[in-house]
Amino acid sequence: MIALAGLSAFVVAATCTGWILWRGGDRGVVDHPNERSLHRAPVSRGGGIAIAAGVTGGCAVGAYMAAAGPELLWLAMGAVLVGAVSFADDLRGVSPGLRILVHVIAALCVVQGGFQCERIILPGLTLDLGYPGGVVFTVLVVVWTVNLFNFMDGIDGYAAGMATIGFTTLAALCALSDEALLAAATLATGASAFGFLLFNFPPARIFMGDLGSTVLGYLCAAAMLAAEHADAAPLWVSVLIFSPVVVDATVTLAARILAGNRPWRAHKNHFSQRLVRLGWGHRKTVLRGYALMLGCAGSAVAAHLSGPMVQFVLICGWVVFYAALMLGVARLERISATASTPGQGENTPPGPRR
């Protein structure tokens, strides 16, 4: 069932993406380059339709074979709400307030399905949030993750590749815990992202748009919370899997807010985008990002199968690694800025003769 759900999702997503391009994807929603863009020519951003179709097809196969319960209908309803407002945003634009309102309603669908997180399990420690606190925490997790994927869809192949690796890893953890339906739905999402990635890998021929990125973000949050609820994977393990996306988006957003910028305004200040501008290019940046994601995925699986001491060491190790990585990017930018300063060193007075 798990394999069939994943295969179905991949075939549907890849076929739909190819069909959109064959029909001339630039006739629909189009991403025109602007001062915040890293691409130079108009590109269709209708790929989210293909991702949504793939997820629907794969999850339908899994739900039919496993006789899914009504709680999954609430998750599906939330996904439809997020997808609808995002598609409207792709077509003509939607106010940030309306988008956030719909995201909160979608998060409440997750709560209504019984997937609220009322406890946070950490290595050697459990924090009890209770029902009211668990509802608030769940809403925050869903709303943030929905927007997190949207923020990170800034360079060719990045968000789709991260989704492919992340959802596939989470599906493996669910399968190891005998959560077959959850594993099938999660693998279907990753396989849909991979089917789209075939056409989105740099140089991208099509973008996923807000529809694709926000639906992937919503499903990421739903899968992480469902895995926590089913004891298939603690929430922190799922966060570790997706940490390249989580850390980049969170740190960048915090820096922008501290600098007085509006958080909902588009920009190109994510670490991945900064590396592209430093000369790495889309392909090198994306491939390094995939390697980082695979390292996080492997660490998450190892942590899930290990004791609290190993888990604590892994967490500390990744915190130090990310801090060093961010400092390294900032250092490269300073070196690049110094090297590109016109006339640098030309008018410097000579030093004393020796």
Image (cartoon, rainbow, N blue to C red):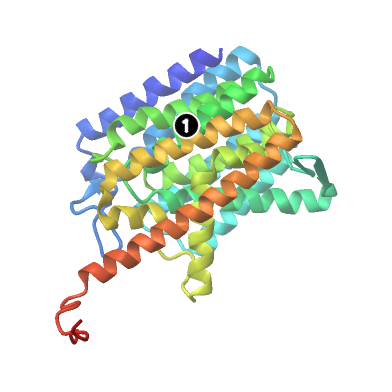
Residue bearing the label numbered 1: 165
- Determine whether, in the image, residue 65 is placed left or right of residue 9: right
Above or below, 276 relative to 5: below
**Which of 330/251 is in front?**
330
Which quarter shows the C terminus? bottom left
Structural crowding at the residue carrying mark 1, measured as other residues with C-alpha within 10 Å and reported as few (<14), some (14–19) or many (≥20): many
- Determine whether, in the image, residue 43 is placed left or right of residue 117: left
In percent of width and height, residue 49 lies at: 38, 37
Three-letter amino acid code at disc 1? Ile
Which quarter shows the N terminus? top right
Q: Secondary structure at mark 1?
A: helix
In percent of width and height, residue 338 lies at: 27, 71
- Determine whether, in the image, residue 97 is placed left or right of residue 353: right
**Which of 287/187 is in front?**
287
Residue occupying the point 62% across, 25% down: 173
Residue 309 in view, yes or no: yes
Residue occupying the point 75% across, 35% down: 308
Extreme front residue here? 354
